[in-house]
Image (tube, grey):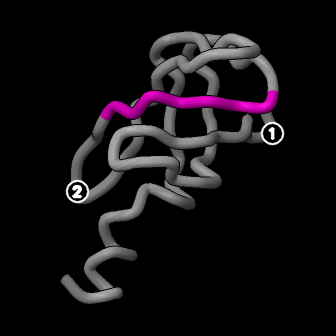
Amino acid sequence: MSVADDFSQSPVGAIGRVTVPIPPNGPGEVLVAVRGGSEAYAAWADGPIGKDRRVIVVESVSARSVIVELLPS
C-alpha cells in the first residue's frame, strides 16, 4: 500500500453526522462520508456533542475510531 492509498482511505478532514451522542468522557458514533459511501466510526470529542450534529474528523485514532470537532452552525 502506498502513501497515496493511506491518504485516500483516511477519514481525516471528512464531514460526518453524529448518530450516537458523544458524551464528555466516552465515545459516541459518527457516520462519515468516505470512499464513495458512508461508514460508522466510534468518535471522541473535547466536549459532548448531540445527535444529528455535523462534525469534521480531525484525527484518526485507529481503523474504526476518530476524534471529531463540531462544525460551526
Residue ID at (34%, 48%): 63
Looking at the rendered structure, the kind of residue marked 1 is Pro
Q: Are marks 2 and 1 in contact (CB under 8 Å)?
A: no
Q: Earlier in the sequence, mark 2 or mark 1?
A: 2
Part of the protein shown in magenta: 40-46
Residue at the extreme left: 1
Residue ID at (62%, 46%): 56
* Residue density around tag 1, few if under 14, some if 14–19, many if 20 or more, within 10 Å: few
Residue marked by disc 1: 72
Structural distance between the alpha carbons of marks 2 and 1:
24 Å
In terms of secondary structure, where does tag 2 sit? loop
Image quarter in which the C terminus is found: top right
Residue ID at (56%, 60%): 13
Q: Is residue 26 left or right of 18 when viewed as pictured? A: right
Please state the horizontal and vertical placement of residue 58, each as a whole percent of the image. Answer: 64, 53
Is residue 54 positioned above or below 21 on the image?
below
Asked if residue 43 is among those painted magenta in the image, a careful observer would answer yes
Is residue 41 positioned above or below 53 on the image?
below
Q: Which SS type dominates the magenta stretch?
A: strand
